[in-house]
Image: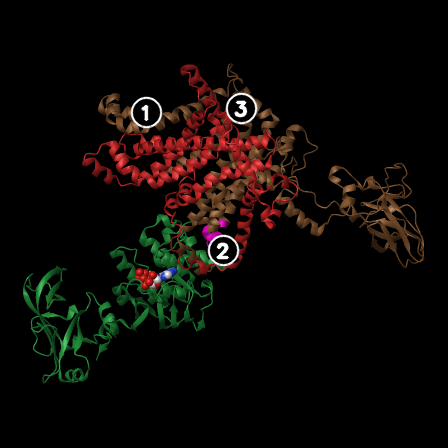
Amino acid sequence: MSASAINANRRVGGHRSWIRQHAVSLAFLAPAAIWLLFIVVYPTIDTVRLSLFNESATRFLGLTNYKTVFSTDTILTAFRNNVIWVLIFPFFVTTFGLIFAVLTERIRWATAFKTLIVMPIVFSTTASALVWATMLDNSPQIGAVNAAVLTVSDWFNPPGAYPVSTTAGQTVADLVGSNSRAEKNSRIVSISSARAGGMINIGLEDVSPTTLTLLKAQDAVKPQPMSGAITGVVWRAFSPSDPTNKTDILPGELGLPLIRLSLVNSQGSTVATTTTTTSGQYKFSNVGAGSFFVELVSSNFSSGFTGISWLGGSSLTPVSGLGQTAQALLSVPLADMAMIITYLWIWAGFAMVLIGAGLASLNREVLEAARIDGAKEWQVFRRVTVPMLAPVLAVVFVTMIINVLKVFDIVLNMASGSSVNATPTLAVEIYNDGFTGGVHSGVSSAIAVILFLLVLPAMIMNLKRIKGV
Amino acid sequence: MANIVQSTDLTKRRRGLSRRLPTRGPSNIILGIIAIVWLVPTVSLLVISLRPEADFGVSGWWKALLAPSSLTFSNYRVLFDQGFVAGGLLDSLMTSIEITVPATLLVVLFACFAGHSLVFGRWRGRDVVFLIVVGLMVVPVQVALIPVVQFYHELGNLFGLNPYGTIPGVIIFHVAFGLPFGIFLMRNFMSGIPKDLLEAARMEGAGEWKVFYRIVLPLALPALASLAIFQFIWVWNDLLVALVFLGGNAHTPLTVFLYDQNHELQANYWIISTGAIVSVIVPLIVFFSFQRYFVRGVLAGAVK
Amino acid sequence: MASVVLRNLTKQYSGNNAPSLDMLNLEIADGEFVCLVGPSGCGKTTALRMIAGLEDVTSGEIEIGGRIVNDLPSRDRDIALVFQSYALYPHLTVADNMSFGLKLRKVPKAEIEQAVQSAAKILDLVDLLKRKPAQLSGGQRQRVALGRALVRDPAVFLMDEPLSNLDAKLRVQTRAEIAQLHHRLQATMLYVTHDQVEAMTMADRIAVINLGVLEQYGTPRDLYNFPNNQFVAGFIGSPSMNFVSMRINRDVERVHLTGMSADSNIKVTLTDEQSDILRKSDGSDIVVGVRPEHLIEGSIDHAGFSAVAKVEVIEFLGNDEHIHATSDETDLVAILNAHSSVARGDSITLSAPLDTVHFFDPTSGLRLS
Ligand SMILES: Nc1ncnc2c1ncn2[C@@H]1O[C@H](COP(=O)(O)OP(=O)(O)OP(=O)(O)O)[C@@H](O)[C@H]1O
Ligand SMILES: [Mg+2]
């Protein structure tokens, strides 16, 4: 503007007349110009200044704040997270958009589908984040994702009647009583052996009473020995009236129902299996010669699937042995992925709409020419459609890079517990450093300046593109 | 860019297309699954908000789909019955409206003015100003926060009117950051209006203001609608600006309400889900009423 | 090289009332150049696209080189199609555009190189091989589109109004190039145009289509001299044939025709045989057709057409003049020598000898002979 003003001066002979000549036009521009100058342009420049001062903006520090930025682990973590976002998200959202756009051209209910996919864009990211936090909740009673995983997992790895929560540090050995011992692979085996006509009773401890209530357990009753068979009872060896007596079956002690048992010979191989009754009794009939042990198989204690902690602090890369800074730089939190998935849900519609419009504006005859030239559908897509869409794909990609560099709401709302420290991005750091507990300018401004520098290439690309239009 | 915008007409005749693509069946199945996946979170939110508080965490929300009679509006009733207490749901809804409506109107108005000046004005340097505006479009909000907070305090020291912590403070900031996109959109649209029309009106003696509101404004209505919807949704859904500028204000918009419920007050999920539904309803209504304009805005604004 | 046979080819788009193509039967001999002409929307493109495999066949059969190809995808039909919009791959160079099909077919590199070079030589594209389509002029793009077809050496060339995007001069020039190409390759070519001049100058045979129905199929000469019906007669020839509705005067000794009004200025005198034929026909009306180029100024003494007409407009074309005149409120166009001294407003007599006059049934439009 100033350059042209100078030109005008020469031409018309005075600043004033130039202004007068265009007074009305400039008045139209004024409100926007004032607003932008005071709230966007000036503050942006001022942030650069503040980044060179101390936290209360009273003392000039030079580049100290920038040194702090690159030597603080939490901020390095934020950089790392931004890198993860930028590497993963734009690629996937563009791919999703492309796939959706191409496939919707082949269905009759395209409008309905597009509406559905676009809808999340108008939700606040806060609401979306909270929805997905629930979707991804650890508990299969809350999180639909874990519930789905549980359903699938139960087909392959059903939980036993007496699950032992290994994630909580419990082991099968905790259940073992005086007449049995824990074996490898979560099995429990009787200490004594028996021959046909004999009896083996196994008392377990630490079995949760609610489990027994659920299984409708009844008082344990010692069975009568039977010739040719091995019999016995598996019971909960705990009586309030005599807590220290672990060997005898006391009145009021409950049998353990539905325990899966194997009869194991002296060579260690299973010769028969059975299950206990509601009062904990079992019977192996027609036992052959030799002596046998009774084994409680491991599936009794399998805890099955207990839920993936999507939004917890776990890392996808092994970093436990590393130092603080190395962890900050190298860990890839699972929670990042959960957030990226949520963000995909929000933004895929945007990519789809843009790419769909690009697709609709393609010259159909070029695609037909390729088919006549001998291309199969996949080749048409790979070698003609995608290259022709390249400009649109680039726009989507760049837009999403900018978007992801600034990612904020989703992280702030989805991070909880241990992932709060694992997932922040630069935008979150700016907020945390600058605004939680009063306004502090220095380091926060330095990060903001860096963020600005990161979006600068995108700005330049936009300018080039729009100048060309 | 130009041809992306042109091709907004998605209904364009595509001859023989459907036949050429032999994979109709699989496409239907794949997209059907995707559609369900995309729908599930929204449905879950709705169902949870309609379930009794006590059911949450005991059984999954999907169980309620088999027993629809267990659903109730009691969560909504409880929150609405609170009335307009500060920090309540209704109060937040009002605050969201109080912020969003002025912020939208001002941006639309100023962007129209500026677009008019940039397209129909005859001062030199218009193109440079436009390019600056385009550059400002990607400036992250974060870059301006701290100086603006200080600027607000400065205003308080000088004139006794400190917008920090007030709703106008939030609005002022939103207007500024909505303008670059707004001006971009309006200028691009207005440059498609034939200049002859304006010249004809000028020759009949219309002044600049009359030309603006009699000719340019009516013709720019579609772009105006796109911009209004965009700005509305953008402001409605903002969390960061409200968090920063509302400071200790007792009245907060819905996004802050949800954030607080989740963080400070720790997961009263029946409140969060009910609040989220309320917060999502308004933009959804806007979206469904003006879907065409929204899509047009998306296509035109791919640079934001 | 291959022949193409269409049997009862029909296309009905869902949602349209009438079929876009109705029972088209056409035989194109090996090496023949056939033009498909007709007014806009008559179904030419539809026919071509069905042959190319881009459009489903509603009913009927398409045979290429003795093989029914109805269910074959485009890529297996061994055809090349030159699109009206050229449909060049915008992201590929001229050379890559031309070699695209061969690369897909995994033709050896050296062979591709050679095919591209020789096509480029024929079409004068050698210097443009490295450019992208956006950097070419319309005529050059057109030649690349032809080149892309040429390189493939297909059994049949299909072209859909390939010249319609060119300016008049370039069109004439490229027309000659395509005709030459055909002579050189002796390839089977099916060429769609709505420009009858293009068809007349290039084709071995012409198929005239109207409203999805084949009106006539024959050599340009046949179509011009012996049009089957009024539509073909009107469509072939430029300016179009003049048509006049006339009344058969049967009661007189020798039948003659007069205009519809009582004191008509138009009349046709007939020979004895013709007289006898028309005396036997049932109708009392008939449509008479005379080509502008057959009309002369002044009367003739033997049997034939004559009309006294008032000159309304004269179009000077250099050697000739097109005279637009009215007689009995019927417009007549005549091509006269530019040296004639006819002026606007004159009343002149226009005549044509009987052997150049065509007669058509007014209801069926069929030519009577
Ligand atoms: N995809 C389609 N769906 C429905 N109707 C169609 C379709 N394509 C063509 N038609 C109709 O079929 C008829 C024939 O169209 P076609 O394109 O074959 O005409 P044409 O002879 O090539 O005309 P032109 O000389 O203008 O190119 C037209 O009435 C047209 O509207
Ligand atoms: Mg056509």
Please name the residue that numbered disc 3 is placed on: A435
* Up-down relation of residue B259 to residue A211 (above or below): above
Depth order, front residue of A177/A97: A177
Q: Residue at x 57, y 40 (%)?
A: A132
Chain given the colour green = C
> Horizontal and vertical percent for residue A247?
91, 42
Residue designated by label 1? A2
Amino acid tagged 2: Gln
Q: x, y (%) of residue A465?
A: 40, 38
The label on residue A379 is 2
Q: Nearer the viewer, residue B113 or C349?
A: B113
Residue at x-position 16% and y-position 79%? C284
Residue A102 part of the magenta segment? yes
Query: How many residues crowd around disc 3 within 10 Å: few (fewer than 14), some, or many (20 or more)?
Result: some
Residue A173 in picture, x, y percent from top left: 83, 40
Residue A6 seen: yes
Q: Residue at x 68, y 49 (%)?
A: A153
Q: Quick one: quadrant of the N terminus of chain A?
A: top left
Regarding mark 1 in the picture, which secondary structure is present there? helix
Q: Distance from label 1 to label 2 (Cα)?
A: 54 Å
**Chain drawn red, letter?**
B
